[in-house]
Image (tube, rainbow, N blue to C red):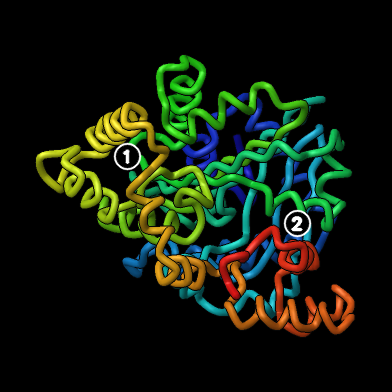
Amino acid sequence: MKTKYFDMKNVYELLPVAGIGQKIKTVEEYAKKDKKVIALFDHLINHNKQTLNKNLPDLKRFIQGFAQVIVGGGGCRVVDYQDMSKYTNLGIYESGVEALLSFCLVSLDKYEMSIYEVQLQLLLKGWGPLHKHHCYTHAVNFNRDNLTTDEWFNNKQKEEALSENNKHYGGITSRHWLKRWKEHASDAKSGRSKKLFHTELRNSEQANAKTIHHRLVHTTETLDEAMNWEEEWVRRNSLYPKGLNMIEGGYAGLKFLHEHRITDRVNISLDEREDAIERYVERQARSGYDNPAIAEMWKSYDYYLKHIQGRPDTLEPEQVRLIRLMSSEGASIEKITEYVGARNTAQVRRVINNKTYTRIS
């Protein structure tokens, strides 16, 4: 298949889904009608080529900015892309920060929306060969209304509110990220696995409406890079009780399993780690505790503060106190949100209603 912008080898490798060739054709036809989209693709391809042979990891080749190429319902749209002057600098990322230039495949029926998201630059020409380790996330949300694809992506307030209800799981694999997803889904469906992520997926089968968002964040050449990313991402976003990872990611998780005598050594393979986590879950189930090692840490106020302050999307203790003070003085939620720098009004409203940050006095 001949294309102007997309590297079909990488497309087929990362998104081996039915009809992907036609979907890419739809995107390229769409681009012909929008000069800004053409400029976006041209800029990213040129940047890909300029950084190709500089021995940089993916996260330092990604450009900072925000744009989503969304394909679904037989159509295509590109949302929130900015002027190309915003995309001039090489993306230098801290561990927990990710590029937001993505390609999304969306399928929607009455009860379930599935989103498959990949970093856009990986699919465009000039990127070059893909690395073998895949760093991925999955998010499950039971609170989606029965919206059409257009309504979902055009209703930003609804999208932001529901994103806060997502339950996240982060992981890495040396196999294909979607093959690993199928393994998770199979383990959940079988009923044998007691892992929190698999239990949540089983529960989702009973939901009236749900969204499952699959995201390939990036690929890495070495396992060390993947492990370091996973450790940081899980700590910030998906470690129980906030998310669906039952233990810490990366090397911290391996150390945890060894310290709790689940494994006889720290350095084990990814497959051995999965088996070890299953044994850990079984042991916890027999003991009658959900996750006592983590629960014990969360009893410590110092650990609680350290953990929430390490997350990029949470409020600092002083922000929480200021929200309560301004609310008691009659300030509007909108004014409080703007003044304290909260993410949105929903985040502030939950503090005022004592649904979050109740341990901060």
- First along the sequence among labels 1 and 2: 2
Residue 221, compared with residue 15, is above or below; it is below
Q: How many numbered marks are there? A: 2
Residue 62, compared with residue 212, is above or below; it is below
Q: Is residue 33 visible?
A: yes
Residue 329, compared with residue 167, is above or below; it is below
Left or right, 100 with reference to 57: right
Residue 184, compared with residue 342, is above or below; it is above
Q: Please tell me in which quadrant of the rendered image residue 211 appears.
A: top right
In terms of secondary structure, where does tag 2 sit? helix
Instruction: Determine crowd level at label 2: few under 14, some 14-19, many 20+ residues with C-alpha closer than 10 A.
Output: few
Q: Which residue is mark 2?
A: 160
Residue at (78% x, 39% y) in the render: 144
- Residue 310, image x, y percentages: 47, 70
Residue at (86% x, 75% y) in the render: 334
In terms of secondary structure, where does tag 1 sit? loop
Task: Name the disc covering residue 358, or none.
Answer: none
Q: Residue type at mark 2: give it.
A: Glu
Residue at (60% x, 75% y) in the render: 361
Q: Which residue is mark 1?
A: 174
Closer to us: 359 or 80: 359
Q: CA distance from mark 1 to mark 2?
A: 32 Å
Q: Report if the CB atoms under discs 1 and 2 are less than 8 Å apart.
A: no
Closer to us: 229 or 329: 329
- Residue 298, image x, y percentages: 43, 58
- Residue 58, image x, y percentages: 42, 60
Closer to us: 94 or 1: 94
- Residue 157, image x, y percentages: 83, 57
Q: Please tell me in which quadrant of the rendered image residue 278 appears.
A: top left
